[in-house]
Image (cartoon, rainbow, N blue to C red):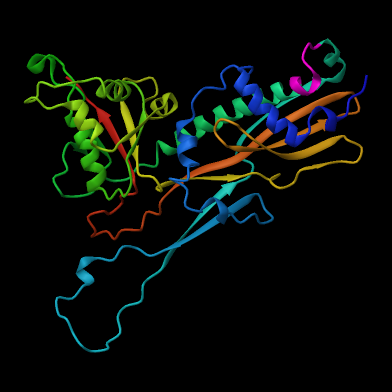
Amino acid sequence: MSYNISTLIECPNLQIDLGAITDKGLNPGASEKAPELQFLKSSLNERGMQAAIVPGGGKIKTVQVTYNPRKLESTVSSSVTTGCDEGTSPGMLDTTYTIDETVGAEVKETFVVNDLARICQSNPEYFATQVARLVDVAKRKMQSDVANQMAVLFGWFGQGGGEKNLTGNTLKTVATKYAAAVDGGKWNPEALQEIIFSAMNSGFTGTPFVFGQGEIFRYFNYADALGDSSDGGLNFAKYYNNNSVAFAASQKMHYALNGNNATNKFLVVDPGSLFLLQYNRLAGNISTLGDDSLMLGTIVDPISGIEFNYKVIKSCTEKITVIISSAYKVVGLPDDIYDASDRLYKTNGVLQFQITNS
């Protein structure tokens, strides 16, 4: 029995089928959240860096970013003149990011054509289900890699302004509960206050996004349900709802920061501070060979919106191999936006916190 690739897997129809399969629940585990991926790919976070990737002919692709560093107040004169003296040049800087098209995620599976006769599903639906499984596991691998890369891109906390409880310049400790001996271990609103303060004091321009799990999950999960705390009658729930902080529960980020240790670190990110560089070699290349032995193109995960290369190969031994892949890398802001004498020196919109409860 012989089958044509174009009959089994036609790109537009396959994309529609992936969404339908997800809606029907035929892809177990596909509902696993990918908060970091969804955040990085959101319009709130993206600012055009993805479009700046230069394909080139080699395996290493580049993105060049040009920017102006923040000027120091010391460059401003106290004297107001009426002359026409020239000032200094703006001092443009640039940073080049690289992405290797051979580093990322790839998964493949081979199907024996004769086995299709024993499958109860229609052939197109069966193949769409298998492709959905491959896209799902590639996305989960990508999510793990992205969390690991984000976890090491934290910068400094802003200097001065009343910042406290720092270890060096890159880690801040907060308590989500009062000491058990003092106040029965009740939830402490000060942790939320310190997250908001540090974000503001470190130059955040948007809503802080908190990524983590463990104790920080329990803290935000209970915030809405709390009434008056024992802290002078402060209404914790009202305080939480009146202050803009977004929490994204992420087991993968928790593991990336803590491993199997009970250290309870979490990450706070300013939108527009981290970027996902992604390169799909087959983007815009939907094609099928005349003998129907090879199909090339891209396919989009219906949950996260992430695009992947997909290749379908039919061999002379009546086997069909499906390959799903993508190259990607997370990058942060350049480290020389702020001068060494600027109080925001080495801040980059990514802060690392740790919970220490008595």
Left or right: where does residue 354 sit relative to residue 109?
left
Left or right: where does residue 275 sit relative to residue 226?
right
Where, by quadrant of the figure, is residue 91 drawn? bottom left
Q: Is residue 303 above or below residue 64?
A: above
Q: Is residue 280 above or below residue 356?
A: below
Q: Is residue 332 above or below residue 258?
A: below
Residue at 44%, 45% (x, y): give it: 45
Residue at the limit of the structure toward the bottom, as seen here: 83
**Residue 180: x %, y % from top left:** 13, 15
Residue at 51%, 53% (x, y): give it: 49
Residue 174 in view? no
Is residue 123 on the magenta stretch?
yes
Residue at 43%, 45% (x, y): give it: 44
**Residue 126: x %, y % from top left:** 75, 19
- Residues in magenta, as a range: 119-126
**Residue 48: x %, y % from top left:** 51, 54
Where, by quadrant of the figure, is residue 125 drawn? top right
Residue 317 in view? yes
Q: Quadrant of the N terminus?
A: top right
The residue closer to the viewer here, 334 or 121, is 121
The residue closer to the viewer here, 56 or 300, is 300
Where, by quadrant of the figure, is residue 133 drawn? top right
Left or right: where does residue 298 sit relative to residue 67?
right
Is residue 328 on the magenta stretch?
no
Please give the count of numbered marks on the rendered protein: 0
Q: Quadrant of the C terminus?
A: top left
**Residue 58: x %, y % from top left:** 67, 53
